[in-house]
Amino acid sequence: MLQRLGLKELPRIHKRDLENLVVPSHIRNTYLTLLKLHHERRRRSLPSLAGILRGISGNADISGEILYSDATRERLVFDMEARVPANSEVTMAELRLYQNAPHKLHLAGRKSQKQDNNARVSVYWVEVLENGANRSSLVDSRLVPIYETGWKGFDVTQAVHYWSKGRREAPLRLELRVEGERPGSYAAEMAKSVRFTAQDPSDQSTGKPELLFYTLNLEEYGSRGDCQSSKPNGICCREDYFINFRELTWTQYWVIEPAGYQSFRCAGGCKQPKRRYGYGERRCAATENAPLPIMYLVKKGDYTEIEVAEFPNMIVEKCRCTMDNVSV
């Protein structure tokens, strides 16, 4: 892990360094930009799966329940029990919310000021700790037009991966936060005009929050050379390997976002040639990798700063047998 992050030694960040920590808006926006690119790369890396996903019957479409709702926040919960079949992979997950355009009377007193046409809507995965406290991690964020009506989609694949690494009988909890597109009280007030159906208790119409996710049966379709736990054969393949930054002692205070990620790793052996002709042994190794955006703390003397960077080679994309670092 240190090698992947380009570190020579463990970062010395302590819990007290997080006290009164506020993420500056420009740092947060940089992270959101990199996170959006990360989501787009993941979607592009699965072009051959698009037709398969659309054709699979039984893709989960789960209606959520509302635990809490006010003008700028909404807490959602989804019952996930028995929703993910055995020996399957959640390839994509989307949270769908129905937005209602604000009433004209609600906006009448604000027309004299410069219009803010968008608001930022962010989705967080919420983890309930053993002591009952909540801990959240940002999974997606986008600008939403204030004056539109219709369904809005958010990529929550990362949240489903987080959930799957914990107690699978527990529900999936998500939190919605609505903020102004830019700093200032007027933008913040306009953002309150963004209303989703579930935020209005008097609205009995359709449009409850939905969780739509696609699963691949690994036995039937496979997944780009991924290992199949039901059919172990010892041959070089890519296996699941989830890294939880919140559980690693040296990253729990250093890494602010994400809470963790699916890193994958290479496992299995490779057939060796009868004659090596002076070449080395064939080994199972990563031949393609992808970067990961990370928001983290940097200690500079007696104070700390927040930085954002895209660290290369954090996610294993493909595994193959290599000889002297050449795929064979």
Image (cartoon, rainbow, N blue to C red):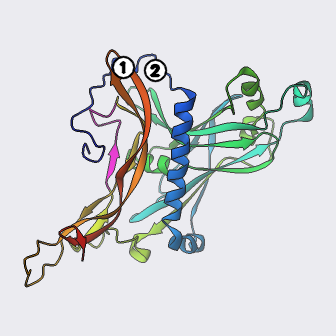
Tag 1: residue type?
Asp
- Tell me the magenta residue range: 241-252
Q: Which residue is mark 1?
A: 17
Q: For this rendering, which residue is in front, 317 or 174?
A: 317
The quarter of the displayed image where residue 183 is located:
top right
Q: Is residue 46 left or right of residue 55?
A: left
Q: Which residue is mark 2?
A: 21
Q: Is residue 41 left or right of residue 14?
A: right
Q: Is residue 209 left or right of residue 83?
A: right
Secondary element at image label 1:
helix
> Is residue 267 positioned above or below 279 on the image?
above
Q: For this rendering, which residue is in front, 123 or 209?
A: 123
Q: Which quadrant holds the C terminus?
A: bottom left
The rendered magenta stretch, by its main secondary structure, is classed as: loop
The quarter of the displayed image where residue 321 is located:
bottom left
Q: Which quadrant holds the N terminus?
A: top left
Q: Does the CB distance between marks 1 and 2 fall below 8 Å? A: yes
Q: For this rendering, which residue is in front, 170 or 119?
A: 119
